[in-house]
Image (cartoon, grey):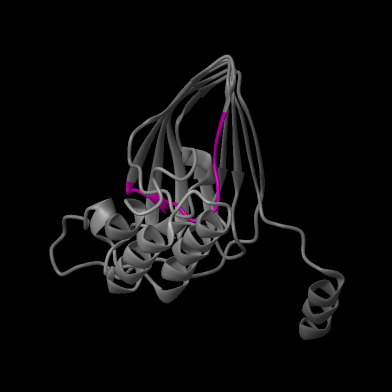
Amino acid sequence: MEIPRRPAAEQATRVRDLRASDADRERVAAVLAEALADGRLSIEEHADRASRVYEARTLGDLTGLTGDLGPEEAQPILVDDRPLTVFFGRTRREGRWVVPVRLPLLALFGTVELDLREAVLQRRHIVLDATVLGGRIRLLVPEGVRVEVTGRSVLSTRELRTRPGADGPTIEVGGTLICTSVRARAPRRSLRDRVRGRLGRR
């Protein structure tokens, strides 16, 4: 997970205007190469888009190059700050996606799953502005990230199994939670990491 530096102005940089990294460009280039191999792109189309990949400076520049090659959930980078809404179902965001400063969530007897392990946080403090009735919020966060539930809760439960760091970013779950289950966890450590952690505490 990456956190871009805060610009001089207090207003957050637009999600689409965040700078792209070399890893972001390589993700898009890999999708274009696959599209060339299976015939979705001609040689000329691939050459044109590939050149634009390595000229791209922002995430918004990159997202337009693969939009017609697969559904939203299969895109190498997701730049979308629209509210997440689900009714009697499930919605999920994962992979390389940008988490805006404030992300509205609306769930009616549905589940919202957010995988933040490869996400880009627009700020170090992110607020999930949730309105959930009879639903579930599931967060998978990297080590060092703190999750706090500050929303108004009625007959709701929370289970926070994260490993926050002293100076790590914070994901705040606010809003209104009615008959809602909130669960956040960090990925399981490998055996090697667990052994190193125990040796380090001695």
Look at the picture and state if 135 lies above or below 35: above
Horizontal arrangement in the rendering, residue 185 relative to residue 17 (left or right): right
Q: Residue at x 28, y 52 (%)?
A: 15
* Residue 143 placement: quadrant: bottom right
Look at the picture and state if 183 lies above or below 23: above
Q: Nearer the viewer, residue 29 or 168?
A: 29
Q: Nearer the viewer, residue 5 or 197?
A: 5
Q: Say if the magenta span includes residue 95.
A: yes
Q: Residue at x 43, y 56 (%)?
A: 42
Q: Nearer the viewer, residue 11 or 95?
A: 95
Marks counted in the figure total 0
Estimate the x, y position of residue 92 in percent, counting from the top left: 56, 36
Segment colored magenta:
91-101
Estimate the x, y position of residue 66 in percent, counting from the top left: 41, 51
Estimate the x, y position of residue 146 in percent, counting from the top left: 53, 56
Estimate the x, y position of residue 74 in percent, counting from the top left: 53, 45
Q: From where the camera sits, is residue 187 visible?
A: yes
Q: Say if the magenta span includes residue 36.
A: no
* Residue 131 placement: quadrant: top left
Q: Residue at x 36, y 31 (%)?
A: 83
Look at the picture and state if 79 lies above or below 173: below
- Quarter placement of the C terminus: bottom right
